[in-house]
């Protein structure tokens, strides 16, 4: 509240002004009153009022003399002058002393209210102008410090210390990226990018500048906060995150925030700002509800790794797609997530940019869904229902959100298919081979899917079937090849369909198990009498 002192030699007027005027309505409170100029001068020195209501004609020191004395030391206090004389000379002298209003006695209550409203508005406008000027000066100082150069060299020590809240005070830079596409709470309107930025900046300014714990500055495309504390401390980070979540969430905005290292001096602010910028530059990779101070050891290691040759990346992508497809077929939700995580690691090593990662994931999911659709008419409707997930990939705000989104979509696909099996592992393997004999199956791949050591799984498989994994797979393929040859397909077509890319290799395998080349088998009159090796 702004303080008021009333100075008038008439007690009735002093009491009337105290009781009849709604001072609080305009942000004022009466701090004291005086019966003459001398007493008014004493109250001014004691109370430092924002406004004085002064009668011109008083015994001893009159109102004009009081004004002249106060103006020698105080140019900010405002005066509302009362006079029983409609004399131009009084008004002229009062104006010369910097009076803000002049009213004749008897005082009209409504006129006083109008004058107070006008004076309060003028004071607020001036205060806003001062705040704006101070804010601009702080921004100029901070810009010079953050970006260095000659501008920073010319700053005085006092200016720099004022900028950081005082000598020896720990401070730091916090940058906030606002997401305008976040779902608003009930009743909150959607925002464009510009509206989101402006709304968030206003709220942050009101919340942080007002409490004196720092100040907000533009750092487009982010919003910057210079905090008079270390934003990297766990308790501080949690408190800041909670405040931002509550305030911005109520406005229908999501955000990502990153803090640079603590600065023990104004010069250290540049490093703090640069650190926060680097983090938000990779904000797609930042996950979790927190104020971020680092990417995380695994991500930093991935990003620091040398890019792999294109052929190696292509092979890794193909393997990831294969593992993902097999895990889906088995109904293995954990295996699906492992395959997605592995695929993501390769993508990040090759190109961690947001659009590049999203495009690669969209391609991966498209390939896998395409392979699933080849599983027959029963699988096609489920795959078609899952296709929108490809578009949804591009709407995910972060890498972790993308992994969760795709994983959840595949969980739903598994649940819809009812493909989760409770059979023993070896029976699941046999059924799996029957379904996927034409794929590039390897014992190592199945060992990963079933969470076994490949050597140990190979021994279990041979004890269970009597054949090694590769022998069993060959026999399944050759049996299917016999069926296809009997249907009149050409040898090279059959080789491809049963999983042998090399026709000569198919010839040797077929002859090994059937006792004759596939071309000779096609010409044999009674093919049904031909037997495959023992144990098949």
Image (tube, helix red, strand yellow):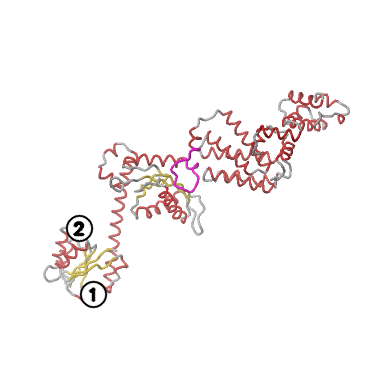
Residue that sits furthest to the left in the current view: 60
Q: Is residue 262 left or right of residue 82?
A: right
Q: Is residue 289 magenta?
A: yes
Category of crowding for the residue at label 2, using alpha-carbon neighbours closer than 10 angstroms: few (below 14), some (14–19), many (at least 20): few
Q: Position of residue 38 (x, y in %)?
A: 14, 67
- Quadrant of the image containing the C terminus: top right
Residue 519 coordinates in the image, percent (x, y)? 81, 24
SS at badge 1: helix
Task: Identify the image quadrant of residue 339.
Answer: top right
Question: Dot 2 lies on which element?
Answer: loop
- Horizontal side of residue 50 vs 222, given as left or right: left
Instruction: Residue lying at the far bottom in this picture: please name it.
Output: 12
Q: Is residue 513 above or below residue 205?
A: above
**Image location of residue 466, percent across then percent down:** 76, 32
What distance separates the C-alpha of mark 1 from that of mark 2?
A: 28 Å
Earlier-in-chain disc, 1 versus 2: 1
Q: Which residue is mark 2?
A: 75
Q: Which residue does the image show at 70% across and 40% down from the upper left?
A: 425
Q: Is residue 274 above or below residue 110?
A: above
Mark 1 vs mark 2, foreground winner is 1
Q: Nearer the viewer, residue 255 or 220?
A: 255
- Give the extent of the magenta segment: 282-299
Residue 497 in view: no
Magenta-colored stretch includes residue 461: no
Q: Nearer the viewer, residue 242 or 88?
A: 242
Q: Left or right: 482 with respect to 135?
A: right
Q: Closer to the camera, 476 or 138?
A: 476
Which residue corresponds to mark 1? 15
Q: Are marks 1 and 2 in contact (CB under 8 Å)?
A: no
């Amino acid at each position: 509240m702004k303080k008021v002192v009333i100075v008038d030699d008439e007690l009735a007027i002093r009491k009337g002004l105290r009781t009849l005027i709604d001072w609080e309505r305009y942000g004022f409170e009466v701090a004291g009153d005086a019966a003459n100029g001398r007493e008014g001068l004493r109250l001014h020195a004691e109370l430092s009022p924002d406004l004085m209501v002064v009668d011109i004609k008083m015994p001893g020191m009159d109102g004009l003399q009081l004004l002249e004395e106060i103006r020698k030391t105080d140019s900010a206090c405002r005066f509302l002058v009362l006079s029983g004389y409609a004399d131009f000379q009084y008004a002229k002298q009062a104006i010369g002393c910097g009076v803000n209003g002049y009213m004749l006695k008897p005082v009209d209550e409504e006129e006083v209210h109008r004058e107070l409203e006008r004076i309060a508005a003028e004071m607020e406008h001036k205060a806003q102008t001062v705040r704006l000027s101070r804010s601009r000066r702080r921004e100029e100082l901070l810009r010079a410090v953050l970006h260095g150069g000659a501008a920073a060299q010319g700053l005085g020590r006092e200016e720099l210390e004022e900028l950081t809240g005082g000598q020896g005070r720990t401070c730091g830079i916090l940058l906030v990226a606002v997401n305008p596409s976040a779902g608003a709470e009930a009743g909150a309107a959607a925002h464009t990018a510009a509206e989101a930025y402006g709304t968030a900046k206003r709220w942050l300014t009101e919340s942080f500048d007002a409490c004196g714990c720092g100040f907000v500055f533009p750092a487009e495309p982010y919003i910057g906060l210079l905090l008079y504390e270390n934003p990297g401390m766990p308790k501080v980070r949690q408190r800041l995150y909670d405040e931002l979540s509550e305030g911005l969430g109520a406005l229908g905005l999501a955000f990502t925030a990153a803090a640079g290292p603590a600065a023990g001096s104004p010069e250290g602010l540049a490093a703090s700002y640069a650190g926060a910028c680097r983090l938000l530059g990779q904000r797609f990779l930042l996950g979790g509800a927190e104020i971020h101070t680092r990417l995380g050891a695994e991500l930093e290691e991935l990003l620091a790794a040398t890019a792999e040759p294109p052929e190696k990346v292509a092979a890794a992508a193909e393997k990831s797609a294969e593992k993902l497809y097999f895990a889906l077929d088995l109904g293995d939700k954990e295996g699906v997530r492992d395959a997605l995580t592995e695929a993501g690691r390769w993508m990040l090593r090759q190109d961690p940019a947001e659009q590049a990662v999203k495009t690669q994931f969209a391609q991966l999911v498209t390939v896998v869904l395409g392979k699933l659709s080849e599983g027959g008419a029963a699988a096609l409707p489920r795959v078609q229902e899952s296709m929108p997930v490809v578009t949804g990939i591009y709407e995910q705000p972060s890498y972790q959100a993308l992994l969760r989104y795709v994983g959840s979509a595949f969980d739903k696909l598994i649940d819809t298919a009812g493909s989760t099996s409770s059979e023993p592992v070896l029976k699941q393997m046999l059924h799996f081979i029957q379904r996927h004999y034409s794929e590039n199956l390897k014992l190592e791949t199945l060992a990963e899917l079933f969470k076994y050591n490949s050597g140990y799984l190979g021994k279990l498989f041979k004890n269970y079937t009597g054949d090694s994994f590769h022998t069993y797979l060959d026999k399944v393929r050759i049996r299917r090849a016999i069926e296809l040859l009997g249907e009149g397909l050409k040898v090279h077509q059959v080789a491809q369909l049963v999983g042998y890319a090399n026709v000569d290799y198919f010839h040797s395998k077929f002859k090994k198990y059937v006792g004759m080349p596939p071309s000779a088998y096609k010409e044999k009159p009674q093919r049904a009498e031909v037997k495959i090796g023992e144990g098949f």
